[in-house]
């Protein structure tokens, strides 16, 4: 029996699948359901200082190669983290709390609060592609990211992940964040896109722009995971378009220690975590991998 | 999740000032089972979930109550106007079970119920259609049910027509004569039926509402608090067992 | 009968489909075949000053949502442009000559040569994602792009297009290029990605990195077309993942005047040009569009 | 275009120092019609096109001549070694035509020809298998053809075995007895057969080679110069009419 337990930057997972941030939102019973369905860890939707209602519908649009969403960071505000973490906790399944701030101070306040509220890890969303002044706009500035990370790092006890998206300078962002003590990297967030309905003759999303997820972004994510691992040997939660064990194994061979899963839940349901884990196990058995660690970044060894 | 199908308003039935049925003609076939829902998008407004009161090939009837901007804009549409539909989504009523069916619709919740009633009639099942409204003139499908030969009862709170009282009180009296209960309507009504079904040990399928934004199980907005159940994927129709097993708790109103 | 003739930045097309650069390469008989099969215009593979053999195989990898290629700008060198243009010419089907230089001077030399050789338009490839010192590395520098365009503009007689890819600053690049006299914009090139074979346990492409094309990038291209049109009302050849008339119409409504088609030729064959054109015609008939001009950028009008 | 299927070398037949047949066992079924090709990827080397000399379910036989790095690495593989296959690609031989078949293989071009011969034999067609090589000992499938009861002729340039001479000269003498000609081999041989077929008005299908890089009709590297025909999509097997209609011009060698 191959070993799927894995320590990702200090986060102990019984298997490498992680519910990606934003999927199923923030409600404790849903996070619990995801945890019971087999995920190695669950990530909350990104919290902001103030509650956010999110955008008007439509908030999702189907495209051939995936999905475009602009939910708009709907969340009850960071104060709710405490109750949610308490109620969502399932033994053996860590909760990663995702945060979207618009300043060093906001990130700091929320990170400290999440840490004290019992989050098992904190993830900084530096890459939401469809909310102004949050996410992407901050995440594209390496100096600012370094400041945010440096500022939080000494103040919390749990592993700190940064979540990045596609940009021209993500290598610089990651390098500086790691220098400042970030423990791991979640890669990637959605990629900015638009879908137009040819009969309605207008963009589908109320926000016009949204984030592309699903199979479309898998090769882009593979590339980013590959590059980050090659350069920094960082702990990576590889995310983007994972629909089956093969997609997951690609990420692991490229350098991911864990696998975030989002969009494909809409097609496969929450059972996808178990399916992916079973598939990885079978693969490891066939290919002679004894433990996950032996697979991580394997393509860099040959 | 599918892309949108364009639909045009073909005819409009006015039930009350705030409640109309739009019969739509779709560019493509899109058949929705009774109890399932579609997302209805009116550009410049929002996209909202609706459980059709009828659906067949490229025809679909939506029965809509104006409660906010989008639903009001919808009932203010004219014949020939365009709107956009995606779906079907969710799990509808299970009509495969053997036995006597008691169907209960409250307010615009009668929409999927009349559709289920028609389908069950075609399947030659024994059914009773019960519609509960505040007063005479608010009834949506009682006449339609009668006209097509369905056993039907109208319950009005003020007694201005049919039987006087709360529909749940009426149901309490007859529930033991039935094997299966299907219902859609205001949450207090559903919750009462939920408790009643638990008590009488009757097989009940109840259609609940929450804010549905994505419709495809991603955003979590439609969760039934505390249960981990999603209206858009696990529902909108839930059996009493499903609710109980997920620790569903009725609110104070029930 | 709706009118599909269109003038794109001075280039007269009988219909809006354009064979995308690099597809089917540079050989005259192939470009001729594409022209006869119904494309409104054909684009050559990008030429470089020196001949290039291109990369070792594998040069393509299939992914779920498209294809990743790293051909490596295989071409016989720009001197061959003359013969190719002469032999590839089909009456009524303009030839766009694509150029990939690594300096202002290289671009200038090739552009002037192509102009004199009878190219109907010149396209500057500023966005090849997998060849060092060419394409992307130049295209990400708005000042340099402006210099290249400004330098060429006065020296050639034919319309000048710049071909851009996904980057953080393409809006700046396009803005400056248009200021310096670029006539049109081709958007977009492929997006950098990696595919790994889980059994071989290594990246498939000999070059490791390649360019993602096909359905995966269509929503990203739609977004870029939308933004460029919204900001600059530029003439755009929208390219990326067009497989059918619907994909094409999305681009046109977003702001494209013409539609580049590449990857989907491998699935649908060259007949795709005709299929797309027929589909657009039917759509225009149904929706009451009399001429293509009325459709271009329509979503910005509502 | 499909993803790769892993294959393992199951057995090796050594024809000459530079020419071997590898029988592969694939992880999944992948059946290639006679004349079609697969892309064979040997990581650390390149990926090259090969027309199998046999293919059935998850077995495939590749007959490979070492001409460069990758082909040499392939014939130097050991039993159990792994390689990766994608395909099948291209159009193979059309074996549906009625009539007497003349099959001609030159050098490793005999690979798809013996495969076609086996398939035609199963179809109970009348065929003659002709293999042309330089000298005795270079023959690839003449014995195999004989063993399975196929009418076969070996032509050696030096006469060390079978009939002496150029295979095209031999064919010239018998061509009028046949209705359909299938051939694969060096380009000068194919071009001679092309002219011969035009002259004799015989239906011929010829398998040409060019540098195949993508295999899926995108890169243009496999064009038959001046014709607009792609070996990977339109070929590798072309009929004489297709070539003529595309203004194919034989090189000087013919
Ligand atoms: C599965 C399903 C089927 C439905 N079928 C029908 C139908 O057949 N006919 C019909 O008229 N309506 C139906 N609804 C309800 C309908 O979707 C809402 O009335 C509509 O979304 C309101 O949108 P609006 O923009 O007009 O109002 P908004 O401005 O969005 O809302 C008006 C008020 O209603 C509340 N509200 C909105 N949606 C819901 C909801 N789902 N649950 C509880 N409160 C809500 C808001 O919070 C607000 O107070 C259905 C809902 C669901 C979930
Ligand atoms: C459809 C098809 C089917 C084929 N089937 C077989 C087969 O069954 N058995 C077999 O041994 N070979 C076959 N080949 C040829 C085989 O693909 C080449 O020999 C191989 O690609 C050479 O690769 P290499 O890396 O070993 O040599 P390289 O170093 O790439 O080439 C060695 C020399 O051969 C030339 N060359 C390479 N490929 C070709 C080509 N396709 N046409 C002409 N010259 C070429 C090169 O220019 C160079 O001079 C087939 C080719 C095609 C197109
Ligand atoms: C509906 C939806 C909501 C999302 N919300 C968030 C969020 O709040 N914070 C965040 O960091 N990422 C968010 N994401 C991005 C995902 O976490 C993930 O990075 C991305 O979708 C790629 O993975 P996938 O292809 O498996 O979905 C969201 C994605 C979707 C589809
Ligand atoms: C095999 C291949 C080769 C390409 N070569 C070039 C090239 O030489 N120059 C260029 O500007 N773009 C090149 N491209 C990019 C295409 O022109 C096009 O921008 C991109 O593939 C997106 O369109 P598609 O999804 O329709 O293929 C190439 C694409 C492919 C798939
Ligand atoms: S509406 Fe988004 S999960 Fe149900
Ligand atoms: S090998 Fe690329 S087109 Fe034929």
Image (cartoon, coloured by chain):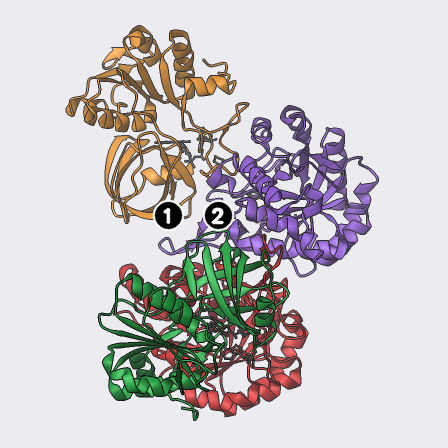
Chain colours: A purple, B orange, C red, D green
Q: CA distance from mark 2 to mark 1?
A: 15 Å
Say which residue label 1 marks. Answer: B4
**Labels 2 and 1 share a subunit:** no
Residue D241 at least partly seen = yes
Whether the residue under disc 1 has CB within 8 Å of ligand 5: no
Residue D21, x across and y down, in percent: 50, 66
Secondary structure type for disc 2: loop
Say which residue label 2 marks. Answer: A206
- Please, which chain is the residue tagged with disc 2 on? A
Front residue of D230/D62: it is D62
Residue C185, x across and y down, in percent: 52, 72
Residue projecting furthest to the right: A154
Front residue of D128/C95: it is D128
Figure quadrant of residue B70: top left
| Quadrant showing the C terminus of chain C | bottom left
| Quadrant showing the N terminus of chain C | bottom left
Front residue of B160/D211: it is D211
Figure quadrant of residue D100: bottom left
Residue B237, x across and y down, in percent: 39, 26
Q: Residues within 10 Å of mark 2 (few under 14, many from 20)?
A: many
Instruction: Reply above or below: A178 against D34.
Output: above
* Residue shown at 62% from the left, 50% from the top: A251
């Amino acid at each position: 029996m191959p070993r799927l337990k894995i320590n990702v930057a200090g986060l102990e997972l019984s298997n490498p699948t992680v519910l990606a941030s934003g999927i199923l939102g923030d409600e404790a019973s849903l996070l619990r359901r995801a945890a019971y369905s087999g995920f190695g860890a669950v990530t909350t939707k990104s919290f902001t200082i103030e509650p956010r209602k999110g955008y008007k519908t439509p908030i999702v649009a189907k495209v051939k190669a995936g999905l475009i969403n602009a939910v708009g960071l709907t969340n009850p505000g960071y104060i709710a983290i405490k109750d949610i973490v308490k109620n969502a906790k399932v033994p053996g399944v860590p909760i990663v709390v995702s945060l979207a701030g618009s300043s060093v101070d906001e990130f700091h306040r929320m990170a400290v609060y999440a840490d004290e509220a019992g989050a098992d890890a904190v993830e900084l969303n530096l890459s939401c592609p469809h909310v102004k002044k949050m996410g992407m706009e901050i995440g594209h500035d390496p100096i600012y990211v370094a400041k945010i990370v440096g500022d939080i790092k000494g103040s919390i006890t749990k592993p700190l992940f940064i979540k990045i998206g596609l940009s021209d300078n993500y290598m610089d962002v990651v390098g500086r964040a790691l220098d400042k003590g970030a423990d791991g990297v979640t890669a990637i967030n959605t990629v900015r896109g638009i879908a137009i309905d040819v009969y309605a003759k207008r963009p589908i999303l109320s926000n016009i722009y949204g984030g592309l997820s699903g199979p479309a972004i898998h090769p882009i994510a593979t590339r980013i995971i590959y590059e980050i691992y090659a350069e920094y040997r960082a702990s990576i939660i590889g995310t983007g378009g994972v629909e089956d064990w093969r997609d997951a194994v690609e990420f692991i061979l490229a350098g991911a220690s864990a696998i975030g899963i989002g969009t494909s839940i809409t097609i496969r349901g929450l059972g996808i975590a178990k399916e992916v884990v079973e598939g990885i196990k079978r693969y490891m058995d066939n290919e002679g991998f004894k433990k996950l660690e032996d697979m991580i970044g394997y393509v860099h060894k040959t | 999740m599918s892309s949108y199908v364009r639909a045009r308003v073909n005819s409009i039935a006015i039930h009350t000032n705030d409640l109309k049925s739009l019969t739509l003609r779709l560019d493509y076939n899109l058949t929705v089972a009774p109890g399932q829902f579609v997302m209805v998008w009116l550009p410049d407004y929002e996209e909202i979930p609706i459980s059709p009161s009828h659906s067949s090939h490229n025809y679909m009837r939506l029965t809509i109550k104006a409660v906010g901007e989008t639903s009001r804009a919808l009932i203010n549409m004219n014949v020939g106007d365009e709107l956009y539909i995606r779906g079907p989504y969710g799990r509808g009523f299970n009509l495969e079970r053997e036995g006597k069916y008691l169907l209960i619709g409250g307010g615009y919740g009668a929409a999927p119920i009349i559709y289920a009633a028609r389908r069950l009639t075609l399947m030659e099942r024994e059914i009773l259609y019960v519609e509960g409204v505040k007063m005479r003139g608010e009834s949506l499908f009682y006449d339609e049910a009668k006209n097509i030969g369905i056993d039907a009862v109208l319950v009005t709170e003020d007694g201005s027509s049919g039987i006087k009282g709360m529909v749940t009180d009426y149901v309490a009296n007859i529930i033991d004569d039935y094997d299966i209960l299907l219902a859609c309507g205001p949450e207090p009504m559903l919750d009462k039926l939920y408790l009643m079904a638990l008590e009488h040990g009757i097989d009940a399928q109840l259609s609940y509402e929450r804010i549905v934004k994505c419709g495809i199980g991603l955003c979590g907005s439609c969760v039934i608090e505390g249960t981990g159940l999603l209206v858009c994927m696990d529902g909108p129709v839930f059996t009493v067992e499903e609710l109980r097993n997920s620790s569903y708790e009725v609110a104070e109103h029930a």
